[in-house]
Amino acid sequence: MSTVATSTSELAARLDRGVPAVEVRDLRKTFRRKDRKAGRFARKRPWPALADVTFTIARGECVAILGQNGSGKSTLVRLLSTLLINDGGEARIFGHDAFEETQAIRRLVNRVSVEASFFKKMSAAENLSYASRFYGMTPRQTRTAIPEILEKVGFPAERRGEAMENLSRGMQQKVALARALLTSPVLLLLDEPTTGLDPRSKLEVQDFIRQVRAEHDATILLCTHDMAEAESLADRIGLLDRGRLLFLEPVSDVKKRFGVETLEEAFFAATGREFENEATEDDDEHREVFA
Amino acid sequence: MSAYAIEMRNQLVGLFGIVERNVYLTKRYILWDVAFMVWTIANTLTIVFIARSAGLAPAAENTLATRLLVGATIWAFLGIIFEFMTEIVAWERWEGTIEYTFMAPLSRFAHLFGQGAFAVLYGLIRASILFFAVAAFIGIHAPNANYGAALLLLALASLSFIGVGIMTSVLPLISPEKGAQLGFVCQGLMLVVSGVYYPITVMPEWMQWIAKVSPATYALRGDRASIIYGAGVAWADVWPLLIIAVFATPVGLVVFKAGERHAKKHGKLKRSG
């Protein structure tokens, strides 16, 4: 389709198929936070966001990591997308060290986060042009590629020139998916891509994720707190709780292991706490970290 | 095409992307730009009218007015470059795109130089409008002006300004709340020592020493000579600018990369809007 897409495909083709898409071993990340109860002038203390996380994702696999707010899901995604530097352990993406070979990894990875982050005064087409240039796509290439990808995600053609600030959350999230796919990533990191969407938009986005899996040679890491979404999209499900990965296996194995019918029950069995009723003490603002 | 050539091509396309994005934003905020231009012209008039109140003979008054106008124009030009460079992180942080930009395979050189290139183009257009609008309003005559030499020197100085701007652009990365303000402090300090409205000889000696390492000193001196006396580009102004540019750009990049590493280590590379 394009030089960059070709070069990304070439890179993907050159990747050793035997090498896992993601290999994480004893990965640690600690931030420093203030304890509010200790008063305004309290010193910041270390607060582990990820503690000795280990897992592997095979090429072409879709893995969901479940966890509540503050469990460390976004920290994991940010570490794998070269936005954070680890404090210990290692992470490899298609055999490349995530903290040393960042340029090689950036060509292979893209991401959709919970916030559809765009220049709000610019249109969908302008935002996609801007993002695609960083991956070497020229105006000639994006002239056809952008309308194609927007059509694929179900974005109305007549609204391509409209400022992002005038679009609904669901529409913005579709553009975010289009932005991630425009660069033909081999590893797609989805960080709560459907949080805050209305039920219809949520289903549309989930259908599109299935379509991406079916049509592209992409590996997907989905971080979410939506158990039903994880169960319907992923081959294996992991549970991240307060920075620790408690398990990562197929849903049927999880249920068998804990002798339960639902993932909610499995969470309770694994942590001794209710999934939905977790205290909000660990939220991002309080922790002053990415969580 | 070799892998190296593909990489170079991709980086140039990325650099163009930064310029293109700023063109889109300028189009969207055009009325704000017009308002800012009117404010800059009004502000410059308040400075240039000082020449009228000095009680000088017409020729001397015209020279003083031109001198003040060149100073105000270069202040405005430099202000644009510093604003664009200092705000490169702050804008993306506010819009929320910062993580997408920093995880893209775009070299920091292409990223920052793309911003600098647009700032220079945009700054030159604004500075030209400002200069000719105020000159026409006040009635300044510059019959000997060598505008070509003045522009050439400003273009050369821009390389140094971008290099220094890259150094200040790291500040919002390290301190999301106060970084941008610190960048403007740097801009103010540079202009104070560079003789923006007065000869640097009126300053204390230690400030004159600092003036020697400020690129604005040579841009102001050379442009005043070109516009008032019609002088060409003087080597005495060119070589310090070249040395500062050669030094400032790589040092700026090293400083920025160190700041980026700090931000990644401490989780400061995040949106705030």
Image: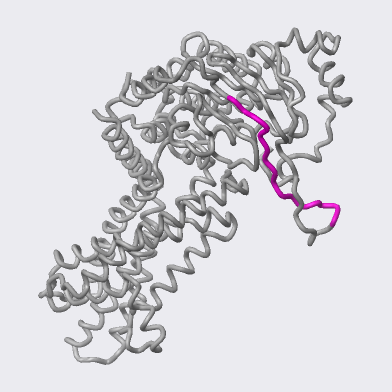
- Give the vertical position of B42 relative to A202 (above or below): below
Q: Which of the 4 quarters of the picture holds residue B22? A: top left
- Give the vertical position of A269 relative to B96 (above or below): above
Which quarter of the rendering shows the C terminus of chain B?
top right
Instruction: Give the number of marks.
Output: 0
Q: Residue at x 30, y 31 (%)?
A: B3
- Give the vertical position of A125 relative to B204 (above or below): above
- State the image coordinates of residue A81 (x, y, percent, origin top left): 54, 33
Residue A144 seen in render: yes
- State the image coordinates of residue B91 (x, y, percent, origin top left): 49, 48
Q: Residue at x 62, y 40 (%)?
A: A86
- Give the vertical position of A68 relative to A250 (above or below): below
- State the image coordinates of residue A196 (x, y, percent, origin top left): 66, 27
Nearer to the camera, A67 or B248: B248
Q: Is residue A25 magenta?
A: yes
Image side of residue A274 versus residue B23, left or right: right
- State the image coordinates of residue A3 (x, y, percent, origin top left): 31, 24
Q: Which of the 4 quarters of the picture holds residue B246? A: bottom left
Q: Is residue A55 magenta?
A: no
Q: Residue at x 59, y 36 (%)?
A: A79
Which quarter of the rendering shows the N terminus of chain B?
top left
Colour convention of the picture: one colour
Q: Residue at x 75, y 31 (%)?
A: A244
Residue A120 seen in render: no
Magenta residues span: A23-38
Image side of residue A184 versus residue B3, left or right: right
Image side of residue B6 versus residue B92, left or right: left
Q: Which of the 4 quarters of the picture holds residue B126? A: bottom left
Q: Is the stretch drawn in magenta largely helix, strand or loop?
A: strand
